[in-house]
Amino acid sequence: MAARDTSFLLIGLLVLFHTWGAWANVEVNMEDRVEVYRGEMAQIACMFTSSDGVGGNVIQWFYVTRTGERQKIYYQDSTIKVVEKGTRFTDRMSVNGTGANGEIVLTVSDVQLDDELEFICVVKALTDGTGEGRTKLKVFETPGSPTIEGVQTGISVHEENPSKIGTCEVKHGYPKPNITWYRNKTPIRATQDVVKVVPSITTESSGLYSVRSELSMKVMKEDKDDLFYCEVTYFVPGGLRMTETSLINITVYYPSTAVSVWVESPKGEIKEGDSIELHCHVDGNKLFSIISISNEDGVSWENKTVVLENVSRLDSGVYTCSSTDTDTWEDVSGNTTVFVNYLDPAVVIPKDGVELSLGEELTATCNALSSLQTHTVWFKDGEKVSMGHSLNLKDASFDTAGTYKCVVTVPEFEGMETSNTLNVNVNGPPQIIEPEFTEFEKSFEDMVELSCDVRGYPAPTVMWSTSDGKILDAKSETDTEGVLQSVVSIKVTSDFTAFCNASNAFGTDAVSFNITATKHTPTPDTTTTSTAIPTAPKKIRKEGSGVIIAVIIICILLLAILGSVLYFLYKKGKLCGRSGKQDLSKEVSSKDNIVVEMKSDNTEEAVLLGVNGEKQPQNN
């Protein structure tokens, strides 16, 4: 009996040892995490090995709930494949593969944010060997573009607490995006009582996150040109991405520490009559500050720019620009000196017109008070006669008389000039300017016009008269630059002499004009004798129209023709005698009366021969 029990015990131990040796060794390998965008499809692979081989294994899929419990969603063995009913993945999951090759893949479509769970793959061998693996499903949503908004009002440096600079916001992201503030490309870190960054996170009903960050800080004057922006970082499958907002700056109010004022225009020197534009600049920036420009007379303008029209030397002086801080009522000022150059009207000495005697001398001066160097030139009748402030006139004559103009200019300023005049008269008896012609020949009933030019001061009186004592009225009298021209028009009825008499308080002068009246008579067919009238060696001006000249030429031609006819008749012997008393128009028919005067080269006796060669007495 004992031997039999011992035998059963040995057989049991052998069976037990055999069973222990048959348990399979199962290894399951899975990725730690699978990352997908929301709405995409997730594939979770489960790879396994077993000492029993890969066939005939039981494969199950689970996920871990928010409470930490396992929820089975799939079962598979060598005979059946079952998707668990009523789970969140029932309608969106599928399992690919039979496990025969040691790999099975769980596919979840249209992944949502709450699908971000841990999935478990359990593989059980035939000999009860079991292995499992775990994979976390991570879901991502790219957020929208971040926005930044700066404060619209200015910030004072006198604020005791940090002032709001701006806010950044990014919406609809998953997982939660992160916002970092930057100033001039340098990250801003929170500092107690100086820099404060307050984030706020909003979870939407969809599970997405919206993040908002507000930056506050105590500002200084140096912050007035700073640029602020936000950097947003967020996760995506396989990595991290970053995006930036646009740049903003802020308005910083700070008190002025320096003020400058200057003349904006004109550039360079200023002269009377210009318009001055003054500009004032303060280095502070205050919302409430008073800026004014004032002069030494207490006149003030509350503006940064002042325009002074048509300035004079009285506008010269110191101009001050002041900036008053309305918080502390402290003043900061700057100033500039304005000098207006001037040129007074020219003063000529002697002041009034001057009268000189013939041969006398005169020294005149012209001066103009100016703040700059001047240049003076004297002109007469538009021509330069002297340079410098003094004008020296020597040996005065009637040519000296006239108006002298002095022009004072400032070489540094184009167009800056002044002028004055000096009238000079030279006292003396009249002087009649010698006429070009004093003798005229005019036809009867023609008009002759005579002109008499007289110089002298005081202005002479001109009187016209004729040789028969008749007083003539002047046709016109004009005074041009000290020369009086008197013109008279006379009708020629006979020979006469006209006198131009000029007189003033210092003497008289006269000139005479001789007018010869000529009468034109028709030229007869008979020969006439024209005797030339001898004239004195004076200039004779023959006046008349072109018709008179033509008549004279015709008369000369007629005389030439008549002379030719007489010479021809003389040569033909038809002209007898020398006395010229015979009637040349009478035709002589008798050839006996035709005589020829002949002279011999050997004797001075003149012989008159008839046609037949008979000698005729000389008296015949």
Image (cartoon, rainbow, N blue to C red):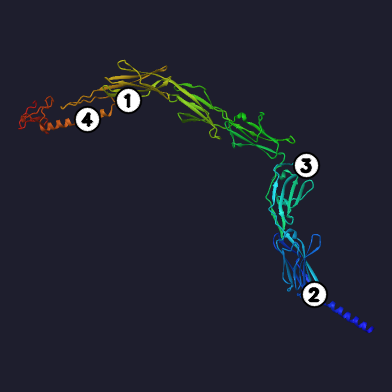
Which is in the foreground here, disc 1 or disc 4?
4
Q: Residue 290 occupies which quadrant of the picture?
A: top right
Label 2 to label 1, Cα distance in Å? 162 Å
Across and down, in percent, residue 433 comes to 37, 24
For marks 4 and 2 on the same chain, the one whose residue lies earlier in the sequence = 2
For marks 3 and 1 on the same chain, the one whose residue lies earlier in the sequence = 3
For marks 1 and 4 on the same chain, the one whose residue lies earlier in the sequence = 1
Left/right of residue 482 with respect to residue 518 in the rendered view: right
Q: Which residue is mark 1?
A: 437
Residue furthest to the top:
469
- At label 3, counting other C-alpha atoms closer than 10 Å, the crowd grade (few under 14, some 14-19, many 20 or more) is few
Residue furthest to the right:
2
Q: Which residue is mark 3?
A: 160
Q: Which residue is mark 2?
A: 126
Which is in the foreground here, disc 4 or disc 2?
2
Amino acid tagged 2:
Leu
Amino acid tagged 1:
Phe
Q: Quadrant of the N terminus?
A: bottom right
Label 2 to label 3, Cα distance in Å? 78 Å
**Residue visible at 46% across and 30% down in the picture:** 382
Q: In this rendering, is residue 60 above or below 340?
A: below
Q: Residue 475 occupies which quadrant of the picture?
A: top left
Amino acid tagged 4:
Ile
Q: Quadrant of the C terminus?
A: top left
**How many circles with numbers are drawn on the protein?**
4
